[in-house]
Image (cartoon, rainbow, N blue to C red):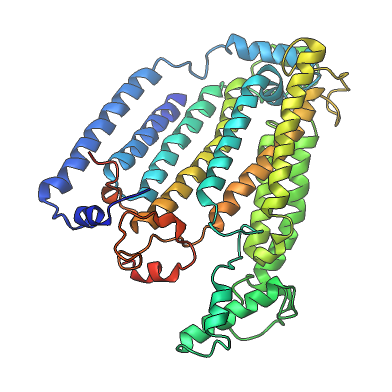
Amino acid sequence: MIVANYVAAAVLFSLGLLTVLTRRNLIKIILGLSLMEASTYLLMVSMAYRRGSTAPVLTSPPDGKSSSDLVHGNVADPVLQNFCLTAIVIGVAVTAVFLSAAVRVAQHYRSVDADDMTALKG
Amino acid sequence: MATDPAAVEHARQEPRTADDDLHRPIVGLALAGATVAVLVLGILDLPRAAAALPDIARHAMEIALPKWGQNEVVSEVVYGSRGWDTFGETFLLLAAVVSVVTLTRSPETRTEYVGESMAGREEQAEVDPKGGGGDSDEQESRQAEEQEEEEEKGGDVAPNADDVPLGMRAPERAAGMSVVVRVGARIAAVPLLVAGFYLCLWGYTPGGGFPAGAVIMGVALVMYTAFGHQAVGRAVRPSVVEPIEMFGAMAIIAIGLFGLLFKDSMFANFLTLAVPGTIRAGGTNQLFSGSELIEVATGLTIATFSLLGMKHDWAPDEDDDGGDNGSDGSDNGSDGSDGREEQS
C-alpha cells in the first residue's frame, strides 16, 4: 500500500502549509517550510519503491545470475533516489539561510512575530 | 533596513479582536484542506509499486557499467547522467552558503566563527582599567571574559576542557561538556570520519560526496559540542574553510570544462575506466564526487558555524541614538547586552 505513503506526504505538505499560514512566529514558519520540504523527500523515496525490488546496485549478483540480469531486473528507481539525496543537502543550506534571516530580523525588530514586521506595509 | 520604530510599536500595541484570532485558522484550514484534496487527486495517478521502471531509470541502469564503469547506479546518476544538474545544485548550495555568510557576518573583524568578541574591550580597559566596579554578577562575567581572553592568547588558564581535573565541583566550564560526553565524542569521531571518507572514496555508495560531506560536517559539530570552540577553532575558521570551499567549487568547474575540452561535452568522462568496485572506478565521477565532498563538507560547516557564531547585534533603542529613528540598527554591533535585557 504505497499509496498510504503518497497520502502521508500530501498531508505532511499541507500541515507545513497550515503552519506557514496560521503561525506568526518566524521560527514556526521556518519549521512549517521544513515540513513541506520533508514531505517531498517522503514522496520521492516512496515513488522510487517497487514491490519485491532490490537496490539499484550492480554488484554481487545472486548465484546463477549476472550483472546483466540485475540491469534488467526488478530494482528501485535510482533517479528519484538521486533527487532525494541532493534535495536534502540543498534543504539544509536553504534552512540555514531562513534561520539567519530570522535572527537578523529578530535583532532588528526585537520580535519574532511576523505581524510586527511592518516595513513593507503599504 | 530603515524602519520607523514608532510604526513597529504601533503595530505591536494595536488591539487584537476576536475576528483577528479566528480568521487565520479558518482561512489556513480551508487552504490547507483544499491543498490536501488537490494533492491526493494528483497522487492517485502516480505510478504505484507494481509499475514498470521509467525509461530514464532503466537507461541509467544500462549505461552505469559500460559507460561509467560504476556499479552503484545512484552515484552514476548523480555525477554521470545528471552531472550538469548536480553542477547547478552545487552552486545553489554555494549561493545559499554565501547568503548565510553575508547575513551573519559580524560588523567587527573576526578570525573565528565562534567565541571571539573584541569590540569595545580597549575602550572598557581605558574607562575601567582594574575592572573593579559593578555588582557580583558583573564581576563574575568580567572574570569569565578575562578567562576567555587568556585562553585566546594561549595562556595557561585551563587551555582546554580536558585540563580541568575530574571530580571538581560545579560549575563546569561552559567551553566543554562533561567527561562522559567528551570521551563519547572522541570514540565516535574517528569511525564517523572514516565512514565519511569511505562513503565518498569507495566508488559504490549512493551519492558519494553528498552524504559524505554531511558526515564530515557532523564530526566538526560533534567536536564543537563536546569540547567547545577552541577544539575546532584552528580548523574551522573563515581563513581556512572558505578557500577550501572555493577550491572544491573550482575543481567541479574544471572537471566539467575538461570533459568539454577532451570529449566535446561538459562532465563527459575523460579518464580511463578502472575495474568496477575499486577506488578508481567511475572515471571522472570519482573526481566529481571528491570535489562535491569538499564543497558540501565546507559549505555546511560554514553555514552551521556562521549561525552558531551570530552576535547579539540588536537594533539601537530610540533613546540610544538621540532620536534618530531612521538610523540603520544593524551597524550597532558593539553593545548587545542592553538590547537583550530590554527584550521582553
Counting from the top left corner in percent of width and height, residue B39 is at: 35, 24
The answer to whether residue B212 of the structure is visible from this angle is no
Q: Residue at x 47, y 25 (%)?
A: A2
Q: Residue at x 56, y 21 (%)?
A: A50
* Image quarter in which the C terminus of chain B is found: bottom left
Task: Tell me if B290 is positioned left or right of B32 in this view.
Answer: right
Q: Residue at x 30, y 57 (%)?
A: B325
Q: Nearer the viewer, residue B56 or A120?
A: A120
Q: Nearer the viewer, residue B318 or B210?
A: B318
Counting from the top left corner in percent of width and height, residue B280 is at: 86, 28
Task: Tell me if A61 is positioned left or right of A24 in this view.
Answer: right
- Going by the picture, which residue comes out furthest to the left? B18
Snapshot quadrant of residue A35: top left
Snapshot quadrant of residue B106: bottom right
Counting from the top left corner in percent of width and height, residue B302 is at: 62, 48
Counting from the top left corner in percent of width and height, residue B170 is at: 58, 83
Q: Residue at x 76, y 14 (%)?
A: B260
Count of marks overlaid on the render:
0
Snapshot quadrant of residue B275: top right
The vertical placement of B159 against B219, above or below, is below
The vertical placement of B329 against A94, above or below, is below
The answer to whether residue B244 of the structure is visible from this angle is yes
